[in-house]
C-alpha cells in the first residue's frame, strides 16, 4: 500500500483537488480537455509530490480516470456504484446469480431507464427534462407516430 507522510501536506491536498475537484481532471468530458488539464497538473503539481505517490498516480489513477472519461462515466461516483449495487441486490433478492441471469437483470434495469427517459420526453413519469432540453419535449400523440 502507498504510504504518504502521516501529516497530510498541502501538495497532496492540491493533487486531490486537481484530480477530483469540481473543475479537476474528473470533470473533463473529452480527450482534448483531459490532456490539457493533465498537462497543467503535471507541470504544476507533480514536481511537488513524493516519487512513490507520483508513480502511483501516473500508473494507476490517470489510466482509470481516462477510461472513465472515455466511457462517459467521468462523474460516476462510489455512491452511484453503491446505489446500483443495492438495486441489483434487491432485484436478485440477495442471492448469487449466474452470469446470464445477472445480464438479464441488468438488461431489464436499463430498459426500464430508457422507458422512463421516453416518458420524460413526453412530460410523463417521475423525471423531467432539464430546462435547457425542454425544447425536445413532445406530446404523446407526436411520440406515437415517431419511429424508433
Image: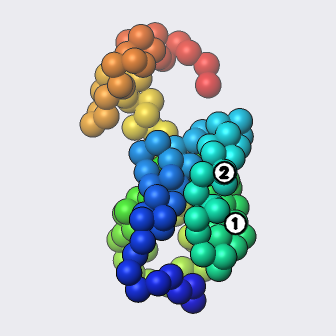
Please determine whether, in this image, residue 61 is positioned above or below residue 20. Answer: below
- Of the 4 image quadrants, the one containing the N terminus is bottom right
Q: Residues within 10 Å of mark 2 (few under 14, many from 20)?
A: few
Which residue is located at x 45 percent, y 14 percent? Answer: 136
Circle nearer the viewer, 2 or 1: 2
Which residue is located at x 56 percent, y 49 percent? Answer: 25
Answer yes or no: is residue 18 visible. yes
Nearest the eye: 130 or 4: 4
Residue holding disc 2: 43
Task: Determine whether, in the image, residue 128 is placed left or right of residue 11.
Answer: left
Name the outermost residue toward the left.
126
- Of the 4 image quadrants, the one containing the C terminus is top right
Nearest the eye: 54 or 120: 54
Q: Return the mark for residue 58.
A: 1
Name the outermost residue toward the front.
48
Q: Quadrant of residue 99?
A: bottom right
Task: Determine whether, in the image, residue 63 is placed left or right of residue 82.
Answer: right
At mark 2, the secondary structure is: helix
At mark 1, the secondary structure is: helix
Q: Return the mark for residue 97.
A: none
Residue at mark 2 to residue at mark 1: CA–CA distance: 13 Å
Please determine whether, in this image, residue 53 is positioned above or below residue 128. Answer: below
Task: Determine whether, in the image, residue 36 is placed left or right of residue 146.
Answer: right
Nearest the eye: 68 or 117: 68
Answer yes or no: is residue 16 visible. no
Amino acid at each position: 500500500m502507498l504510504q504518504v507522510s502521516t501529516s497530510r501536506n498541502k501538495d497532496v491536498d492540491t493533487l486531490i483537488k486537481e484530480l477530483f475537484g469540481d473543475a479537476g481532471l474528473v470533470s473533463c468530458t473529452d480527450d482534448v480537455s483531459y490532456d490539457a488539464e493533465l498537462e497543467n497538473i503535471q507541470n504544476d503539481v507533480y514536481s511537488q509530490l513524493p516519487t512513490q505517490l507520483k508513480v502511483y498516480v501516473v500508473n494507476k489513477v490517470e489510466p482509470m480516470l481516462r477510461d472513465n472519461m472515455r466511457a462517459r462515466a467521468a462523474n460516476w461516483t462510489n455512491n452511484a456504484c453503491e446505489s446500483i449495487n443495492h438495486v441489483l441486490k434487491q432485484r436478485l433478492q440477495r442471492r448469487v446469480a449466474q452470469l446470464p441471469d445477472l445480464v438479464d437483470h441488468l438488461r431489464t434495469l436499463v430498459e426500464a431507464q430508457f422507458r422512463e427517459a421516453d416518458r420524460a420526453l413526453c412530460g410523463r413519469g417521475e423525471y423531467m427534462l432539464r430546462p435547457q432540453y425542454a425544447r425536445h419535449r413532445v406530446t404523446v400523440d407526436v411520440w406515437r407516430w415517431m419511429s424508433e
